[in-house]
Amino acid sequence: MALTGRAALLAALGSLPVGIWEPSWTGMLAVNAPLAVACACDFALAAPVRRLGLARSGDTSARLGEAADVTLTITNPSGRPLRAHVRDAWPPSSWQPGTEVEASRHQLTVPAGERRRLTTRLRPTRRGDRHADRVTIRSYGPLRLFSRQGTHKAPWTVRVLPPFTSRKHLPSKLARLRELDGRTSVLTRGEGTEFDSLREYVPGDDTRSIDWRATARQTSVAVRTWRPERDRHILVVLDTGRTSAGRVGDAPRVDASMDAALLLAALASRAGDRVDLLAYDRRVRAVVQGRTAKDLLPSLVNAMAPLEPELVEMNARGLTATALRTAPRRSLIVLLTSLDAAPIEEGLLPVLPQLTQRHTVLLASVADPHIARMATSRGNTDAVYEAAAAAQAQTERHRTAEQLRRHGVTVVDATPDDLAPALADAYLALKAAGRL
């Protein structure tokens, strides 16, 4: 229970003339006694808060950057109308900065024996699960002099999913996939592809594609057409160690890696390949296996949503052993990690032959565009030193990438905006070359 500002204002206004014309305890009592009686009556007429019934409904998931509406139903079982201010508390990251007060506070009136709904619109700024906190209700009497206040638990969880901003690149990558698949006039030939069909020879065709047996059975020269192999296994390994926590722009590296993994998974599933996910640092953080093309993306975004980087060094030996168990047959292993020299040289390179002798390995890393801008800066002494430091960092990064390539690893190093399409292009190139 609590006095309102209106009661305090009335007490101050009543005490002012008493203090001027009749400064005595009798005068103060004459003013405040009626006010106290009015507050007591107002308190008695306010609807009780403890007996209210609360229930939630609404959205249980939303993509990062989108809104989620959660409805709170308040039931008033008492015989008095409820005039209330409601604060629906959620974690601070559930709203854009500066909008929490307006979004979480509501006013409503619930007649006796009825129920009303109010909607809280969330706009989360981080991935993960957002759990509803307490609901605080302040009930007023008809004069709004005194109030009852209570807190209720109304559990609800909204899962904030990765935004998948690289979805815009999917149509262009699918068009290239159709070219590789022989559904357009561009036909891919070469080792490691599957036989598709026979057609009549036209000038310019590779003579190595002529099928002499089929030609002998008909009057025209027949050539074979090919399509990329299907039903290949792709294991996406997401590094959730300390290097993935580094921020590039406004988001950590792991978010850009997740976006690239989603585009690759969407493209590979359309190509008829099977895609699994393994998130690892020193232990398995998430596994997605055996999903159909229809269920793959929902399973991936749900598994990725609660993942947060651990501030520990990624255990390369443990990751390699887990990857080999997860992919017992020859597969394409896509490792989303950093190209920092120390973790690669001390952790990954000693165990890399275990992966490359059984699998095709593709490593994708998020590059910092700020370093590229620093490398071109000039104009004063500080800028020159920054450019020298950036050039040294780039040289070290290129040297690490070359070490990986000498071990047969395909390396993709791109900025957050370019990583997803670059990884998709690398996958298509491997598929066209028959290396999967």
Image (tube, grey):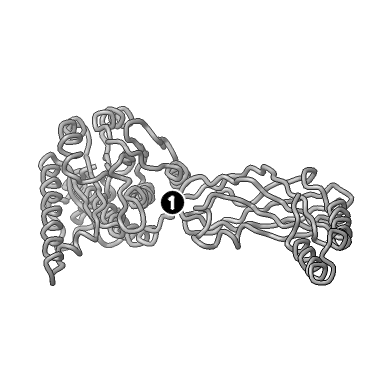
At 87% across and 51% down in the image, what residue appears?
44
Q: Please state which of residues 341 and 384 is positioned toward the viewer in this rendering.
A: 384
Amino acid under disc 1: Pro
Q: Quadrant of residue 311?
A: top left
Describe residue 8's horizontal placement relative to residue 335 as left or right: right
- Residue wearing tag 1: 162
Quarter of the image where the C terminus is located: top left
Residue 407 drawn above or below residue 321: below
Describe residue 401's horizontal placement relative to residue 323 as left or right: left
At 78% across and 46% down in the image, what residue appears?
52
Task: Residue 187 in the image: state x and y as whole percent.
Answer: 24, 57
Residue 355 drawn above or below residue 404: above
Q: Please state which of residues 322 and 329 is positioned toward the viewer in this rendering.
A: 322
Q: Provide the secondary structure element on which disc 1 rests.
A: loop
Q: Please state which of residues 310 and 357 is positioned toward the viewer in this rendering.
A: 310
Q: Please state which of residues 229 and 96 is positioned toward the viewer in this rendering.
A: 96
